[in-house]
Image: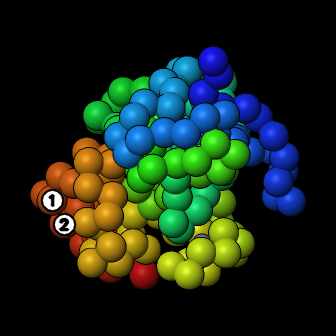
């Protein structure tokens, strides 16, 4: 039995669950390659490493209240898991802020996820409220949780802005 199907929403191609999932269940493993260049479809998996998907991961849309969480070990291809209980037919989306440091390629596009928690812009980790991190426990790219690196990067940001 398939776990997901590629379908269409008003925003274009997207993934839908083909069955129910329990929280923490693996939905699919990413397929693709690691690269140093960010693209419209890539996932940041390290300070200088991006995962360029060739399979289903290419069609994962952003939601500020998503159904999926990614497990990302620095510099590795991610797995996609049920962040909460997911019902058959629900859209399989992820919060880009849990793996992108900034969403420079998306250029802060307006978010249309429609969730009550919507941040209005598609932001990276820098735009996530620290108080919100708890609900993504276990599903934030581990390179982002390296506090020493975060401190270094934000210092740079303030100097250049
Ligand atoms: Zn949103």
Which of the pair 62/50 is nearer the observer? 62
Which element type, helix, strand or loop, lies under badge 1?
helix
- How far across and down, in percent of the image, does residue 106 sit? 65, 60
Q: Residue at the spot x=43%, y=74% of the render?
A: 127
Asked if residue 140 can be seen in this view, the reply is yes
Q: Residue at the spot x=26%, y=55% of the render?
A: 137
| Residue 56: mark in rendering | none
Asked if residue 36 can be seen in this view, the reply is no
* View quadrant of ligand 1: bottom right
The reply to whether the C-beta atoms of the residues labelled 1 and 2 are less than 8 Å apart is yes
Q: Which residue is the site of mark 1?
A: 147
Task: Choose top left, top right, bottom left or bottom right for residue 9.
Answer: bottom right
Q: Residue at the spot x=76%, y=34% of the render?
A: 6
Position of the C terminus, as image quadrant, is: bottom left
Task: Choose top left, top right, bottom left or bottom right for residue 60.
Answer: top right
Which element type, helix, strand or loop, lies under badge 2?
helix
Q: Does 148 sit left or right of 76 as displayed?
A: left
Within 10 angstroms of label 1, few (less than 14), some, or many (20 or more) residues?
few
- How far across and down, in percent of the image, does residue 91 sit? 66, 50
Which of the pair 65/35 is nearer the observer? 65
Q: Residue at the spot x=60%, y=28% of the render?
A: 3
Q: Does 83 sit left or right of 112 as displayed?
A: left
Which of the pair 115/148 is nearer the observer? 115
| Residue 151: mark in rendering | 2
Which of the pair 95/91 is nearer the observer? 91
Within 10 angstroms of label 2, few (less than 14), some, or many (20 or more) residues?
few
Position of the N terminus, as image quadrant, is: top right
Alpha carbons under labels 1 and 2: distance apart: 6 Å
CB of mark 1 near ligand 1 (< 8 Å): no
């Amino acid at each position: 039995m398939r776990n997901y199907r590629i379908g269409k929403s008003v925003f274009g191609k997207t993934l839908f669950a083909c069955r129910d999932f329990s929280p923490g269940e693996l939905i699919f493993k990413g397929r693709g390659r690691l690269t140093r260049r960010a693209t419209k479809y890539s996932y940041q998996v390290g300070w200088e490493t991006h995962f360029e998907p060739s399979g289903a991961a290419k069609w994962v849309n952003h939601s500020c209240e998503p159904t999926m969480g990614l497990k990302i070990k620095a510099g590795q291809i991610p797995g996609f898991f049920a962040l909460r209980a997911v019902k058959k037919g629900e859209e399989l989306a992820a919060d880009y802020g849990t793996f992108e440091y900034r969403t420079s390629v998306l250029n802060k596009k307006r978010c249309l996820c429609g969730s009550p928690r919507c941040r209005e812009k598609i932001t990276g980790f820098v735009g996530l409220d620290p108080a919100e991190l708890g609900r993504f426990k276990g599903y934030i790219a581990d390179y982002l949780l390296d506090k020493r690196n975060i401190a270094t990067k934000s210092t740079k940001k303030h100097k250049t802005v």
